Amino acid sequence: MKLSLISLTSVLLISQLASASDNSVEVRTKGSSSLIHIDQIGASNAARVWCGLSEGNYTTHNCNNAEIDIDQNGTSNVARAYSQVTLHTGNKYKIEQTGNGNFGYIDADDDLNTMDVVQDGDSNDGEIYMQGDGNVYSISQNGDDKEAEIRAFGNYSDFSIDQSGSGEHYAKIYASGYADNNDASITQTGSGDHYMRLNFYTDDYDVTASQSGASNKSITATYNCVTNCNKTIVISQTD
């Protein structure tokens, strides 16, 4: 059993309890008001937080009002949370994984971020990348063999992916550069293997998509907007 408590200028609470001492934690932080909490129970888990102090080729920069919480329960889980580029403000990152073999990854960038990846079960993959302003992204997955990915390089975005059921579900949202004023929600559930990929570019989208049932379903959509766009798209498939 391995238990460690580290206190610096920022508050770091790191706790590892496992049958084997093969868990790994890496925290590099810089900035103000950071509270970083990492809790791993199980074996062969890995967690990494960089916040302001980047591991890449970027200049050392602030992370500001970040609260980063990585909580893993089970074995062989991988969780990462970065804060890339510059000018981070009111950041909140949360990765919570229960089960085995889950992968959670938040990259994150500027401004009023709230990132959230919650996974339950085994072999789930939840990833969020972003760069923009008042963003709130959320991925929640329940069950096994789920994969969700959100990209987005834009402003005023609110994305959410929720997948559950016994089927293998895949969902991806990609909003591209300068994709302002977006609102998207994806829900996939049921025993069928569901696939969903949505791309929408630049300005004024409100997207809702849902798939459920026992039969396999697939949605591939690409929305292009050039000027004066105001779109509302609703897609629903069920048995």
Image: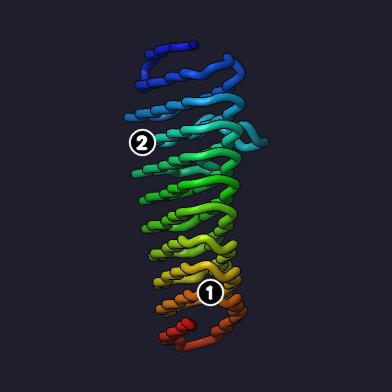
From the image, tell me which residue sits under label 2: 67
Q: Is residue 12 above or below residue 102?
A: above
Relative depth, front residue between 108 and 172 = 172
Residue at the spot 34% in from the left edge and 37% down from the top edge: 65
From the image, tell me which residue sits under label 1: 214
Mark 2 or 1, closer to the camera: 1
Residue at the spot 38% in from the left edge and 21% down from the top edge: 13
Residue at the spot 43% in from the left edge and 19% down from the top edge: 15
Amino acid residing under circle 2: Glu
Q: Secondary structure at mark 2?
A: strand
x, y percent for residue 224: 58, 83
| Residue 146, picture quadrant | bottom right
x, y percent for residue 229: 46, 86
Amino acid residing under circle 1: Ala
Q: Is residue 92 above or below residue 48?
A: below
Q: Secondary structure at mark 1?
A: loop
Relative depth, front residue between 126 and 207 = 126
Mark 1 surroundings within 10 Å by alpha-carbon count, few (fewer than 14), some (14 through 19), many (20 or more):
some
Q: Is residue 214 visible?
A: yes
Residue at the spot 45% in from the left edge and 70% down from the top edge: 186
x, y percent for residue 6: 41, 13
* Mark count: 2
- Circles 2 and 1 in contact, beta carbons < 8 Å: no
Q: Is residue 127 visible?
A: no
Relative depth, front residue between 85 and 72 = 72
Mark 2 surroundings within 10 Å by alpha-carbon count, few (fewer than 14), some (14 through 19), many (20 or more):
some
x, y percent for residue 26: 56, 24
- State the separation of the CA atoms marked 2 and 1: 39 Å
